[in-house]
Amino acid sequence: MARTTPLAASSSDISPADLPRRRGLIVILSVLAGALVAALWSFTLVDSVIGDNVANTLLGYDAKGTAIGGLIAGTAFAFVSGLAGTFTACNIAVFGAIAPMANARDDRDGRMSTAAPGGSLSLRSTLGPIGWLALGMVAISGAYGAIGAILGERLPQLSTAVGGSGLPPRLIQASIVFGVIGLAFLYLGLAALRVVPDPFAALSLRFPHARLVVIGALIGGFLVGRPFPLFHKLFEYAARTHNPFYGAAVFILQSLGNITVMAVLYVVLVYATRGRFTRWMTAKPARVATITAVAFIVVGAFTFLYWDLRLPARFGYGWFPTAPWQ
């Protein structure tokens, strides 16, 4: 039989005494880890080797080389290309959401449902955080899909021009969007350690799921900057339909594909372990703060450094270290 236990450490509940001792060291090491991943990252591996092969296998044809054959085919292409882009640089930050989902409040009185040892865990309580995350994500991706279908090539993301700087407009848009999202994740990581004020401290008391909805909105925002070739192909097709409802639908499916692997991993960690992962994580407030902060700071540092330092460096603007295989 399920039992409820007080949430060990939401951002608004942690007292200074419950925070990890070496917060500065946690921040520095997390930023360095994000920078290391940004330097070692191989976009050829994740975009072409992994992404293209996954899409080709699931669709049964050359995803890049074959034209999208109608609205139904475009719908299938949307989800599959989203799934194929799971590990791309414009989506990998989605895995930073696992920690806050595992620490999410489950009901209105601020408690979280967990399973007693040897007992069962409610599937509803396990899927609940995914639903709130998806709510914020779908709102942004759906709205952008509708706008994209209406505006089409007037958006920099679909422009084929080369800017005066040498950077294509679509990459300039990607740099701006992911730079902002990366900084947002960095801030959330610092807030988990109370280095900066928690923006959800007051709001979460009235709307316990606000944090997950906003994180979902940031994930939905990935589509606003995404230059992933398969997504670009989907975007071009949706724009040609000039149908905002279809544009919204396929962008939502793209986003759902983007979080599928993360969602399955989360369910395995929480539900398949009968809540042991959640109980371990929330057993100590300092542990919750540390895991949440590390997850957000690493993905935030990676996202910002990759798109705002490494990307411009490829076009001769500044310098950023890269691995020999780049």
Image (cartoon, helix red, strand yellow):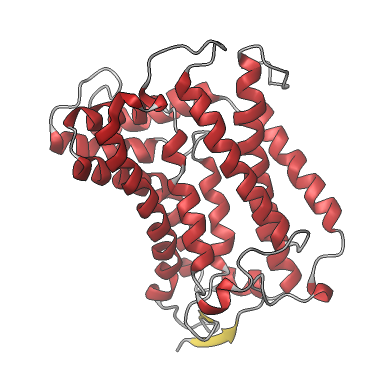
- Examine the image and state in which quarter residue 41 appears: top right
| Residue 194 relative to residue 114: left or right | right
Give x and y (percent) for residue 78. Answer: 28, 38
- Examine the image and state in which quarter residue 97 appears: bottom right
- Residue at image point 72% right, 22% down: 320
Give x and y (percent) for residue 319. Answer: 73, 18
Give x and y (percent) for residue 27. Answer: 78, 50
* 284 vs 316: above or below: below
Give x and y (percent) for residue 10. Answer: 64, 73
Viewer-closest of 43 and 206: 206
Q: Is residue 238 visible?
A: yes
* 237 vs 178: above or below: above
- Residue at image point 52% right, 24% down: 172
| Residue 27 relative to residue 263: left or right | right
- Examine the image and state in which quarter residue 136 appears: bottom left
| Residue 314 relative to residue 145: left or right | right
| Residue 325 relative to residue 285: left or right | left
- Residue at image point 47% right, 86% down: 2
